[in-house]
Amino acid sequence: MAKVELDDVRKVYPNGYVGVAGASFEVADGELLVLVGPSGCGKSTLLRMIAGLESISGGTLRIGERVVNDIAPKERDIAMVFQSYALYPHMSVAENLAFGLKLRGHGKDAIQARVDEAAKTLELDALLDRKPGQLSGGQRQRVALGRALVRNPQVFLLDEPLSNLDAKLRMSMRVEIARLHRQLGATMVYVTHDQIEAMTLGQRIVVLDRGEIQQIDTPMALYERPANLFVATFLGSPGMNVLRGRLLREDGWALALEDGTRLPLAGDIGLSPAWAGREVDAGIRPEHLQRAVDEPFAPVVEVVEPVGSEVFVNLRQGVHPLIARLPPGDLPTPGDALPLRVEAAHLHVFDIETGRRLEA
């Protein structure tokens, strides 16, 4: 396996559109790094540049210690798994697994050994004689993974490999890929638009928007300390609540909303005295809207979604939609005012002009 290094890698199209603007990061040897962002953010373009399927407009790309900017894809020693399975329908699973190795001139015994090893790793042993049309979606995706695995490449590149699967299969395949990575110790770069996939799979995550890297960190660091409002609202399910208001400090801290409502903030950990009187975008995770008694902040319940171990309560405070994650029990009724409280330590404060996180 090998590390991957990007130094100010850019993609600018002939019409001047900037697909990727100056990406710089390193994928450590054996790391599973996830590129995540909305459609059109540049994540697949970045992956295709690593693969050699897209030319690089500027910067330096290294795989191992070798600069590969102008190296053909087949010479980069990478293997790519695409969104579509791209299996040959007339070939058996074993033949699909072996096909790439045959093209590269490997001997029959070496091919058989690698196919057997990949089939065992991915639990495809009993399916080797079947055609793709006889397989489930999850089995086909495992064959696509196996076809990359038999190559024994320096780097695995995965471009939204689970997006064609239903929710249950996506969950089981996430576990499969995480297990495979742990077992192989492989260097993997994984692209997805699904932030749940990103959070559960990535050892580190690169968050992109409009061709620019917004933040790179571990999943929980991104969740707990987002660098800007985009990262804050993109990661997390349900997403972060955002209230625009003015921070006030009298007997304690409070957030005064545009409609005149005040949200008292318990404690003051993380809030700077210099912010008093400043208008901000205040972010609150759904789990940090805590049910209370006789609090002045009492948004109106619109929809209640019990999902078993927890309850999502959709509320509205003036123009602000909110969602609270509450434990099951005595459920509120649509139309009720639901008193809530927030600890100041759980408030994320962002500049309204730049969207950047404010640090005390």
Image: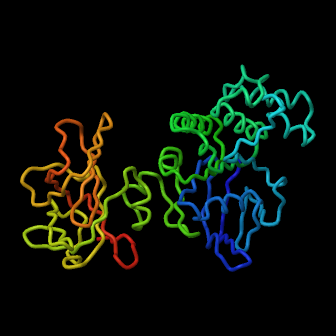
Q: How many marks?
A: 0
Instruction: Work out which quarter of the rendered image holds the C terminus and state it.
Output: bottom left
Question: Toward the viewer: 135 or 27?
Answer: 135
The residue at the point 30 percent across, 70 percent down is 281
Q: Quadrant of residue 81?
A: top right
In the rendered structure, the answer to whether residue 138 lies left or right of residue 220 reads right
Residue 157, x across and y down, in percent = 68, 50
The residue at the point 26 percent across, 45 percent down is 304
In the rendered structure, the answer to whether residue 14 lies left or right of residue 211 reads right
In the rendered structure, the answer to whether residue 178 lies left or right of residue 3 reads left
- Residue sitting farthest toward the front: 335
Residue 314, x across and y down, in percent = 27, 51
Question: Toward the viewer: 291 or 25?
Answer: 291
The residue at the point 62 percent across, 36 percent down is 180
Is the residue 317 above or below the residue 329 in the image? below
In the rendered structure, the answer to whether residue 55 lies left or right of residue 218 reads right
Residue 170, x across and y down, in percent = 55, 38
Question: Toward the viewer: 289 or 9?
Answer: 289
Is the residue 150 above or below the residue 17 in the image? above
The residue at the point 71 percent across, 74 percent down is 13
Residue 260, x across and y down, in percent = 15, 72
